[in-house]
Image (cartoon, grey):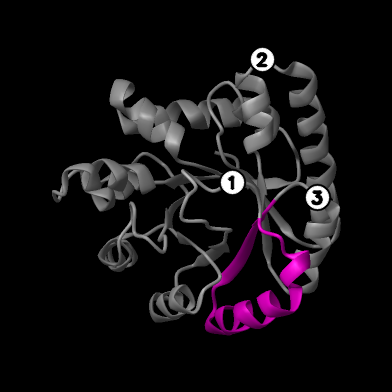
Amino acid sequence: MTADLRLGVNIDHVATVRNARGTAFPDPVRAALLAERAGADGITAHLREDRRHIRDEDITRLKAALTVPLNFEMAATAEMQAIALRHVPHAVCIVPERREERTTEGGLDVARTENALAQFIAPLREAGCRVSIFIAADATQIRAAHRIGAAVVELHTGAYCDAHHEGRPQERDAELARLSGMAALAHDLGLEVHAGHGLTYETVQPIAALPQVRELNIGHFLIGEAIFAGLAEAIAQMRRLMVEARS
């Protein structure tokens, strides 16, 4: 992989399968280590308030086992802040979270809670965590993320991916143009730009081709594809597509 485009692999849904039977397997930490051996540049895990997939002990074990960076996704709550400060992962990504959602829907409204978020992330920054904010490709939110002192913004690619897979090419192209413009804005403000949510083999290349994007975080599709091809091959194919797009 080129030095300027990294692949983060989200292993949440290995834990989803584990929890469906209440057993110890499949083990998300084993999946993370396999992903690391397959060339993942980092591992992402989202510890939700309801612990629907990743659990507290998974975070403890991931932090102890990984040699690549751990990106800890979390809501902006006192409980999650305390957990992050206890483990001090390489990065924390602040995401919106609602109990009734199936997965993260849309980006965080940074502008509406700017002062509170600035105070919330300050201890995380002081502890040495890189703070990322998961947001929609929206200028107001990007500027607010910059003002509160985030190092990274992760742009939500879900609307772009949905439009593609639902056969709405005009909306897909409009979303891609929005992502391109907002990646450029974030980069110009000095923010590192990541992207993710819903990316597949079919949709990854236009996002990977955006020159300001430094990291893609992909999970659900890779875990699903691993059922058919194996996780190492799924990661290798995603990397091939990313490299091809970048070159």
Residue 235 seen in render:
no
Q: Which residue is labeled 1 in the image?
A: 105
Where's the C terminus, which quadrant? Answer: top right
Q: Where residue 42 sits in the image (x, y, percent)?
A: 46, 52
139 vs 159: above or below:
below
Q: Secondary structure at mark 3?
A: loop
Q: Quadrant of the N terminus?
A: top right
* Residue 167 tag number: 2
Look at label 3 and name its amino acid: Asp
Instruction: Classify 10 Å Cα crowding around label 1: few (below 14), some (14-19), many (20 and above).
Output: some
Residue 191 in the figure: left or right of residue 123: right
Q: Name the quadrant containing residue 226.
A: top left
Is the residue marked by circle 2 packed among few (<14), some (14-19), or many (20+) residues within 10 Å?
few
Report the front residue among 210 and 133.
133
User: 215 or 247, which lies in front?
Assistant: 215
Tell me residue 18's x, y (percent).
22, 45
How many numbered circles does the render carry? 3
Disc 2 and disc 1: Cα gap in Å? 20 Å
Chain-order first, disc 3 or disc 2: 3
Q: Residue at horizontal 57%, vertical 59%?
A: 95
Q: Which residues are magenta?
A: 108-135
Quarter of the rendering containing residue 113: bottom right
- The residue at the point 37 percent across, 29 percent down is 224
Mark found first going from the N terminus, 3 or 1: 1
Q: Earlier in the sequence, mark 2 or mark 1?
A: 1
Element type at mark 2: loop
Residue bearing mark 3: 138
Please state which amino acid type lies under the numbered disc 2: Gly
Spatial separation of the CA atoms under disc 3 and disc 1 = 15 Å
